[in-house]
Image (spheres, rainbow, N blue to C red):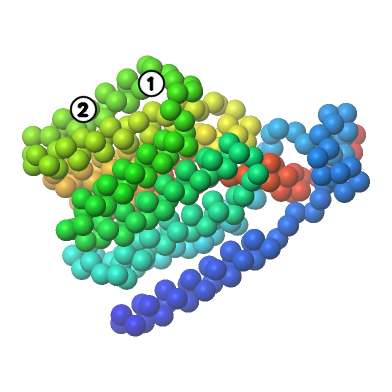
Amino acid sequence: MYVMQHGILLFHIDIVLSSVISTRSKKPESLMANHGNHCNDISCHNCYIPHTTAPIHVFKNVAPKLVPFTKFVCIYFVAWTPYENPNLYAAIIKCLPILALFAFVCLQHTTNYEESKYRYCVLLGLLLSCVGDFLLIWEELFGYGVCFFGCAHIAYICGFGWLEPFNVRLGIGIYALGILTYLLVLPVLPQVVAIVTGLYCITISTAAWRAVARVEFTWEIWKWTKLFAAIGTVLFCISDTMIVFSMFRGWSLPGNFQRGIVMSTYYTAQLGIALSAVNHQKLLMESLALQKPRTD
């Protein structure tokens, strides 16, 4: 049975890698063949690049690149390896979706310095999260896994930015929720665990504050990516809060509902953060290739 599981896993990996390669090799047809690659003249109806594009076209462009992530998430929930039997197979199954998101962000190459800096921060955060996921499979390595996730949040914070926009009221509100959560579990925490949990609570609250503070409600590409980052960090907070309450307070949903919600919110959180790192210009050009050219 163990050999069969590995065989099935390798078969799925082969299919997913093939889909990644095929997605990577596809290139949109040029919309500006006769006007140069950098024509941005608003008076040119044939090749002017608007700063917005329809959400449906964005979805059509991004969705194929997320096929590996979707497949690996399905494999995780189908395999459903029990926590009572930690092993290398379970660790790999758990890490594969994050590795798929890591590959997705790697494909979002850009020459813009600020965007490159942000993507490197997201890539580092995903990599550290993957190590944390691997370690959390074994209960005796739980503390090390939490430290890696804390470092992942610091990487995300560096990408979100520390000061602009500052939004003091939002920060106070998010930190208040974080402190309240911490105080609910503090009485039952050993001293060392209490310190680590407190530091992690501050870190993830800061990540949520900095991500939500950047949100601007508009369909411009560089704005909805910020919205995805905010949604991702909020879901991260929800997932981790459920874990803390379950571990230290015994407050959990019956049966497998607890684990199912924790992992689904976690993977969705990482997906949101990964989507915030898309290459804006490349996505815009590929999305426009799906639309009919203007003729007026």
Between 151 and 20, the one nearer to me in the picture? 151
Q: Position of residue 146 (x, y in %)?
A: 26, 48
Q: Considering only order in the chain, which callout, 1 or 2, is on the residue closer to the N terminus?
A: 1
Residue ID at (58%, 31%): 223
Q: Position of residue 283 (x, y in %)?
A: 66, 45
Q: Position of residue 199 (x, y in %)?
A: 24, 36
Residue annotated with mark 1: 170
Residue ID at (55%, 37%): 225
The image shows a total of numbered marks equal to 2
| Vertical relation: 286 (above or below) 53 | below
Q: Residues within 10 Å of mark 2 (few under 14, many from 20)?
A: few
Residue ID at (31%, 80%): 2
Q: Quadrant of the N terminus?
A: bottom left
Helix, strand, or loop for circle 1? helix
Q: Which mark is residue 180?
A: 2
Between 183 and 37, the one nearer to me in the picture? 37
* Three-letter amino acid code of the residue under disc 1: Leu
Q: Which mark is residue 288?
A: none
Q: Residues within 10 Å of mark 1 (few under 14, many from 20)?
A: some
Q: Quadrant of residue 284 in the image?
A: top right
Position of 291 with respect to 63 (left or right) is: right
Residue lying farthest front? 113
Q: Is residue 294 visible?
A: no
Residue lying farthest top? 169
Helix, strand, or loop for circle 2? helix
Q: Is residue 292 visible?
A: yes
| Vertical relation: 212 (above or below) 140 | above
